[in-house]
């Protein structure tokens, strides 16, 4: 008997002994007077067991059949379902195997079978969450996750995520490299599907921000990166996060994707980039945009349509500036190009030319607001003068110089008497002249 049942028994016995009324007992037990009268009648029949539930100790009518339990355990023991939690396992059992088992019942079953271990509750530091933006399209968080998405079944892939801050609506795709070009393709895909958001929220990676030079004598503002320039041309703001916790919404979405998406790709047997993006578009993103999303505080959409003057192919490209030579040529990527004669006009010589390396591999050049036609100049073959034939005759050694002869004579001359020996000569027995 639990403590709650003991307390209920004390109140019922006071009502039985007329110490309190049935209405007072009902108010104290928070039940109706009719229920109190029913419990008092049962108290006369069975005694203190009246407060104990009649089904205690008996098998529940909703208990799963043994065959169903064994079949569920057998399915979840397969390698493709390794690491599945109760929620995800319940969804896959219902959709693929037509076994409808509640999440809590399946949790107990997986705990008993050793297929899942409940994590202990950890004490985390209290963090004040930033409030969501009020409407869809005001702020879109943007980041890339490097993970073993295919679990060794195929090539290494990166997942680019774009998640709306107000609704958590997801737009994503797999790429082979986390490069400027692949991120530009992702922006193109997002703009065509949703329109232009007011701001993108990213980290301070080198593709978004130029690293400042700390020891530079002149602290000037760093030039924008290719993506920064493209966003400015499209009229989209950019906000940098100072820490991963600042963009926690997209970081938590990566944790969900690294759990559910990896297991979904495993069950589907995905091995290539194309099939992975197909699964992402047809299964994972529809599930995400139906379940984890929330309703925005304001129903209006802040996305803006692409105007006629917005050229995605021009803005979302690698742009460099070149100077036009006097012969109307310019160099780009170690090649020489010349502007077509019909596009030559005054002011071209020495002017700055915008060169666009577009995502499809083509090159476009623009002077002010006009695109110019150009062609590659064929390099002239270099004329190499033939080298003279080597003279194999043996040359006579040069004649010795007078300085060389004088040095050799000094070396070959017989040395004189040493000074110490000359000092020992007795001058009293010798002539004045040494022989």
Image (tube, grey):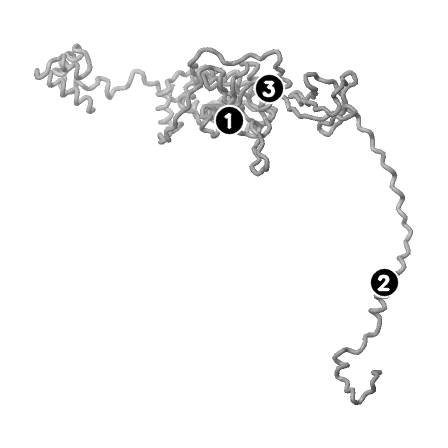
* Of residues 102 and 179, the one drawn nearer to the viewer in this rendering: 179
Residue at the limit of the structure toward the top, as seen here: 34
Q: How far is the residue under mark 2 from the one under mark 3?
A: 79 Å
Residue 240 image label: 1
- Identify the image quadrant of residue 31: top left
Residue 105: x, y in percent?
A: 35, 20
Determine the residue positioned at 58% across, 32% down: 220
Q: Secondary structure at mark 2?
A: helix
Q: Is 67 placed left or right of 191 in the picture? A: left
Q: Secondary structure at mark 3?
A: helix
Determine the residue positioned at 13% across, 14% down: 24
Instruction: Please name the residue that numbered disc 3 is placed on.
Output: 233
Residue 217: x, y in percent?
A: 59, 37
The first of marks 1 and 3 along the sequence is: 3
Residue 417: x, y in percent?
A: 79, 78
* Residue 272 visible in the current orientation: no
The first of marks 2 and 3 along the sequence is: 3
Instruction: Please name the residue that numbered disc 2 is placed on.
Output: 403
Tell me whether circle 2 and circle 3 mark residues in contact (CB < 8 Å). no
């Amino acid at each position: 008997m639990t403590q709650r049942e003991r307390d209920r028994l004390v109140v019922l016995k006071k009502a039985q002994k007329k110490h309190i009324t049935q209405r007072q007992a009902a108010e104290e037990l928070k039940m109706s007077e009719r229920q109190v009268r029913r419990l008092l009648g049962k108290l006369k029949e069975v005694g203190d067991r009246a407060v104990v539930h009649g089904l205690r100790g008996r098998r529940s009518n909703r208990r799963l059949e043994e065959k169903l339990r064994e079949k569920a355990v057998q399915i979840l023991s397969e390698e493709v379902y390794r690491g599945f939690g109760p929620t995800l396992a319940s969804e896959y059992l219902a959709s693929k195997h037509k076994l409808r088992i509640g999440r809590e019942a399946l949790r107990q079953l997986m705990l008993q079978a050793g297929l899942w271990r409940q994590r202990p509750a950890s004490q985390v530091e209290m963090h004040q969450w930033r409030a969501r933006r009020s409407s869809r399209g005001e702020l879109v968080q943007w980041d890339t996750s490097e993970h073993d998405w295919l679990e060794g079944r195929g090539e290494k892939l990166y997942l680019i995520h774009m998640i709306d801050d107000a609704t958590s609506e997801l737009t994503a795709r797999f790429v082979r490299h986390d490069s400027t070009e692949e991120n530009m393709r992702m922006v193109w895909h997002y703009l065509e599907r949703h329109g232009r958001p007011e701001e993108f929220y990213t980290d301070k990676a080198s593709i978004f921000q130029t690293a400042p030079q700390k020891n530079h004598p002149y602290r000037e503002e760093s030039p924008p990166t290719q993506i920064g320039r493209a966003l400015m041309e499209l009229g989209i703001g950019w906000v940098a996060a100072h820490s991963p916790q600042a963009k926690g919404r997209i970081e938590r979405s990566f944790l969900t994707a690294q759990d559910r998406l990896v297991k979904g790709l495993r069950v589907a047997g995905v091995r290539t980039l194309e099939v992975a993006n197909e699964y992402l578009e047809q299964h994972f993103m529809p599930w995400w945009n139906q379940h984890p999303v929330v309703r925005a505080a304001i129903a209006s959409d802040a996305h803006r349509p692409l105007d006629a003057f917005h050229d995605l192919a021009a803005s979302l490209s690698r742009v460099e500036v070149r100077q036009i030579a006097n012969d109307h040529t310019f160099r780009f990527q170690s090649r020489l190009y010349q502007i077509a004669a019909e596009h030559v006009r005054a002011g071209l010589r020495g002017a700055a030319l915008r060169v666009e390396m577009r995502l499809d591999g083509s090159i476009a050049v623009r002077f002010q607001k006009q695109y110019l036609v150009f062609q590659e100049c064929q390099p002239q073959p270099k004329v190499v003068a033939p080298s003279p034939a080597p003279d194999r005759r043996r040359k006579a050694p040069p004649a010795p110089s007078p300085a060389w002869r004088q040095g050799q004579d000094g070396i070959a001359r017989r040395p004189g008497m040493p000074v110490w020996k000359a000092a020992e000569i007795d001058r009293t027995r010798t002539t004045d002249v040494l022989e």
